[in-house]
Structures are given as C-alpha cells and as structure tokens.
Image: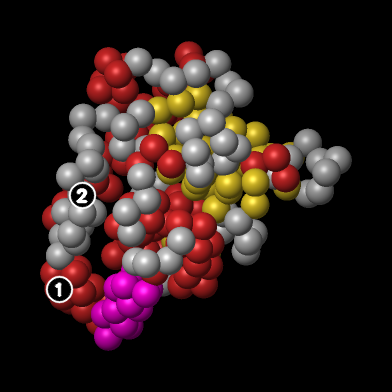
Amino acid sequence: MRLTKLQFAALSSLCVAGLLAAPNVDRIQELAQQRYGQRGLQAMQSWRDQVNALKRASEEDQVRRINEFVNKRIFFSDDLSVWNEKDYWATPLESLGRGAGDCEDFAIAKYITLRTLGVDNDKLRMSYVKARIGGPGSKISEAHMVLGYYPTPDSEPYILDNLIGDVRPASSRSDLTPVFSFNSEGIWTGTSPAASSAGSATARLSRWRDVIARLQAEGFE
C-alpha cells in the first residue's frame, strides 16, 4: 500500500529530484580530504572512478558492481562506535570517507551512487525489513535496511544487502520480512498495516531529510 502524496508530504518536505544530475566532484573530494585526510580523499576518488567506469555499462552491471563496491569499501559497525550517536544516517561521503557504517549507510550509499549513474528513481527503494537471524527455524529477528532494485514497475525486486555479497531476487530472501520502503518520491508499507508503520516511518524519514540537506551541502546536486 502506498501512502497518499499528502501523507508523504507531511513526512518528508525535501526531495532529491534535483540532486545527482551533476555532482560537484571537486567539492566532494575537497570535503573528504578536509574531514578524513588522505584516506577520505582516496575513498572518494575511487568512488568517482567507479562511477565513471560504469557510465556506459548495462543497468544490471551497474547494480551488481555498485553493490560490490560499497560492500567492500564500508566496514560494518554500529552508529555509537562510528558517530557516537544512537541512530545516525550518513551520506556516501561520510560513510565511504570514514570507511565504516551500519546497514542504513550501505543502503544510502548504493541508492545515491546508482542515482548518480542515472538509474531511474522509481526503480530504487530503500526498504526497512525484519531480518531473521539464527537460521530457517529461528523466531529471532532484528531491524535491517536494504536497497531494492525493480527492473520494471511490476517486476520482482532484487535485493542489495550488506549481509550478502551477491544481488538476489526478493523471493530467495525468505529471511527478510518487509516493513516499509521509500525513495525521494514516496513511501510504501510492506506486510505491516500502514497505521502501525507510520510512526516508525515518520521518525526515520526525519533522518532522511537530514541526509538530503547534508547531500546538498556536500555538492551532490
């Protein structure tokens, strides 16, 4: 179920539609060096080189290789360890520059990079899920974020996940239960009722607004 435009406007007043068409790479690299030194500069130079190398690749290759690139470049760590905050959503400059982040940071970096490559916004959704841990018979789950890629509007999504190296169709990920998903244009509920997920979505999308503001300040526009 998709929320109405009015409901979504109440949740998110900023849009990334104007972002990413032509990132100011010089500014991004300058900020990376200022904040994270030579390591940060090299990280964003690698990001730029990866984007340039994939501009003429097929969309399938772009999705697969960006998933691999981000998974290799970011070391998984919780927000308290990386940012000294309980819940912080990082921009690609921040997560790649520092070289660490949690599941939200992986998903955001993949989303922004694929948008930079020109992948249509309606093909990408960042998705909150409940991830089952402990094997098929386990009843234990934890909150997790992945990126979904939809080759066509009605197709089954493919899941880009920092926990698994390859990109797999959603039907093969029985360990994931969707809660809600979003991009810059809307928010959708998964298997949970819209009313029960609205509060969670509101809290998380306030962090999405913060990410968008920082993206604009960093030169992703």
* Residue 2 percent location from the top left of the image: 44, 20
Q: CA distance from mark 1 to mark 2?
A: 16 Å
State whether the magenta stretch is mostly helix, strand or loop.
helix
Q: Is residue 121 visible?
A: yes
**Above or below: residue 97 compared with residue 168:** below
**Residue lying at 78% horizontally and 36% vertically, measured from the top left:** 139
Secondary structure of the residue carrying numbered label 1: helix
Amino acid under disc 1: Asp
Q: Quadrant of the C terminus?
A: bottom left
Q: Position of residue 118 (x, y in %)?
A: 32, 54
- Residue 206 lies in magenta, yes or no? no
Residue at the disc numbered 1: 26
Residue highlighted by disc 2? 19
For the residue pair 104 and 22, the one nearer the viewer reads as 22
Q: Which residues are magenta?
A: 38-53
Q: Position of residue 206 (x, y in %)?
A: 30, 35
Q: Quadrant of residue 53?
A: bottom left
